[in-house]
Image (cartoon, rainbow, N blue to C red):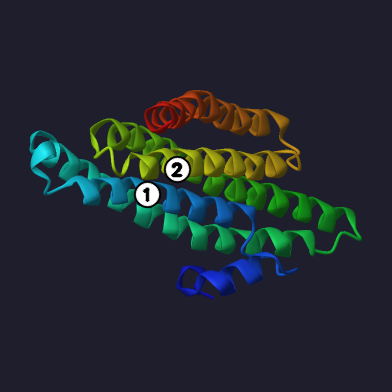
Amino acid sequence: MEFTGLSCGDFVSLLGSKAPVPGGGGAAALVGAVGIALGNMTASLTMGKKKYAAVEDELRRLKEEAERLQGELLDLVQRDAEVFGPLAGAYGLPSGTPAEREEKAQVMEAALREACSVPLSIMEKCGEAIRLLEQFAAKGSRLAVSDAGAGALFCKAALGGASLNVYINTAAMKDRSAAEEINRKADVLLGEYEAPADGVFKSVREQLK
């Protein structure tokens, strides 16, 4: 199923059902795409206005980057669902004999690593989006700055949500050294991008109040 082709209503209904996908990772990717789209909206509402002519070329460049991120995050909605299949299959493998248990453990470990890779990618893309939203908020029209602020909040939520999907998979890994290394990557991304997202929100809120 192509999840990004669903209506908003159908996606949300499916998300709230007992269907295994889409799940938290896909939801995080979608929220991140919405967040950076709000940055794009800020640029779109600013470009063409004489008051902001000096930053028009820069906004056009930023908008191109944002559109790329939108597409990549939407692709990750689908990718997150795709990597769940092998993981679900691994859980269902037989484990009645020592050989079966060994094979299942190996398949599980590989599937868990792959399942971690997608939310990590979502986190990376959300971090890029937050950096762009900083610039949209600084350079965009004051009449549209609330969109950039909201976008930063959405991308921070997506960043955090994706991290939980990393941690739940690493918790099941037997290779604790590998799991801790993956967790460190997620920790670094949270540490690097949560504060800038908060900064955008606070800056925009202060301008509006």
**Relative to the observer, which residue lies in front, 79 or 67?**
67
| Residue at position x 72%, y 69% in the image | 17
Distance between mark 1 and mark 2 Cα atoms: 7 Å
Q: Which percent across, then down, holds residue 16?
A: 69, 65
| Residue at position x 46%, y 27% in the image | 202
**Relative to the observer, which residue lies in front, 194 or 99?**
194
Q: Secondary structure at mark 2?
A: helix
Residue 38 is labelled as 1
- Report if the CB atoms under discs 1 and 2 are less than 8 Å apart: yes
- Quadrant for the N terminus, please: bottom right
Is 69 positioned to the left or the right of 124 in the image? left
Label 1 or label 2, whichever comes before in sequence order:
1
Is there any visible trace of residue 64 in the rendered image? no
**What is the three-letter code of the residue carrying label 1?**
Leu
Q: Which percent across, then down, holds residue 125?
A: 42, 42
Label 1 Cα crowd, 10 Å radius (few <14 / some 14-19 / many 20+): many
Residue 150 is labelled as 2
- Quadrant for the C terminus, please: top left
Q: Which percent across, then down, holds residue 95?
A: 87, 59
